[in-house]
Structure formats: structure tokens, C-alpha cells
Amino acid sequence: MTIRWFGPLKWNVALVALACGGLLHITTTFLAPQMAKSRAAMRIAIDLPANKMVVLPPASAKSQPLPFMSPDMRYAVCRYDAGNGPIAVNATLADKGWSFGLYTLEGDGFYAVPSQTTRRIDVRLVLSLSPPADRTFGFLNFGRTPEQDASNVTLPQREGLVIVRASLKGQAYVKEIEAYLGRATCAPHRPD
């Protein structure tokens, strides 16, 4: 007496099983970052005061507040909280290799300004939450709309990080770079 465990394999059953396995794999891949216990941006945000720019100490192999911090860069970070009103952010990108970025606490970047090789860039932005009555019904309502002034940025969330990254050309430039980073501000906006 012979027992046939599987019988003839049906192609439609095999294709459905393969499709279900693929969907499960893709879903797991996309959900893994959301289910992480600790996000780097949230860890650094706990230690930072709200709406105040802080120049971080130089990164080393043993002390990196954020992952993948380069030791040849200097960083100034601000944890913004727009719950009580708009936030004014000012920073200078003094040389090539500098950058300015806005990030959510989940680490998603939604605004960036790279430096230019031929000139210094002064970044002056007002960060604010989107108005409650929005024609997009809350979908994709961050960044800029055509009606907005170029210096206004709509935030996707109430809290997040502003990161100014400065390229370190050599030890002789450390004081100058730290002075530029120290002049960067992040504070509640006071209209003129």
C-alpha cells in the first residue's frame, strides 16, 4: 500500500502560494523599520532641548549620537517642536560639502539644501504645521505649495530634527567651522 502525500501538484496552487509568500516578504520588509524598538532620531531627540540648536562634539568610533556620523564632519542639531507655533531656523552653509536638512523623528528626510561651490548660502526658514483646512485632505501636505513664500516650510509632523552638516577641511578650520555652526539658530518665530 503506497500513500501519496501530495498527489499531482496543481500549477494554480503553486502560483498562489508563491504570490502569498512574496507579499508576506514585501510586507515584512516594509514593516521592519516601523517595528524597531528604538530609532536613532528619537534617541538623540530625548537628549536635546526643544527649539535650540546644539553643536555636537566630534564623532568618533565609540561616540556617535546618530548612526553613520562621519569623523570628518561637524554637526549642529535642533529638535524642533512646532506645537506652540512656527519655528524660525537660520544657518549658514559656508563652504562646499555643507548641507542643511529637515527630518521627522522617524528619520525621514523631507527638506534639504546642499551647499554651493562658488558661494555661501544663508538658510532662513519658518517651519510651521499645515493649516487644518487643507485641500489635499491631509495627504502629502508638507514641503511647499505654489502659494507659499520660499522661506516657509510646512512640516509633516509637530516634532523633528534640523541637522546642519559641515565638512571639516582640516584641523586649522575647526574653530571657524564651529563658529559658523554656533551661529545657527532654531527658535520660536516672532513675526516682524
Image: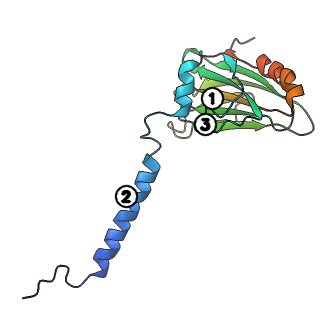
As drawn, which residue projects farthest toward the right? 118
**Mark positioned earlier in the residue sequence (2 or 3):** 2
Query: Horizontal and vertical percent for residue 168?
Result: 82, 32
Say whether residue 46 is left or right of residue 87. Answer: left
Please name the residue shown 87% across and 22% down the image.
176
Tell me the distance, in whole angstroms, between the alpha carbons under discs 1 and 3: 10 Å
Q: Rounded to the nearest whole Å, what is the CA distance between mark 2 and mark 3?
A: 29 Å
As helix, strand or loop, the secondary structure at mark 2 comes to helix
Q: Is residue 191 visible?
A: yes
Q: Which mark is residue 63?
A: 1
Pointers 2 and 3 in contact (C-beta within 8 Å): no
Query: Going 77% across and 17% down the picture, which residue do you hit?
Result: 182
Measuring from the top left, give residue 60's x and y in whole percent.
68, 31
Q: Amino acid at mark 2?
A: Leu
Please name the residue that numbered disc 2 is placed on.
24
| Marks 1 and 2, how far apart at CA | 37 Å
Q: Amino acid at mark 3?
A: Pro
Dot 3 alpha-carbon crowd within 10 angstroms: few under 14, some 14 to 19, many 20 or more: few
Question: Relative to 158, is 169 on the left or the right?
Answer: right
Label 2 vs label 3, nearer the camera: 3
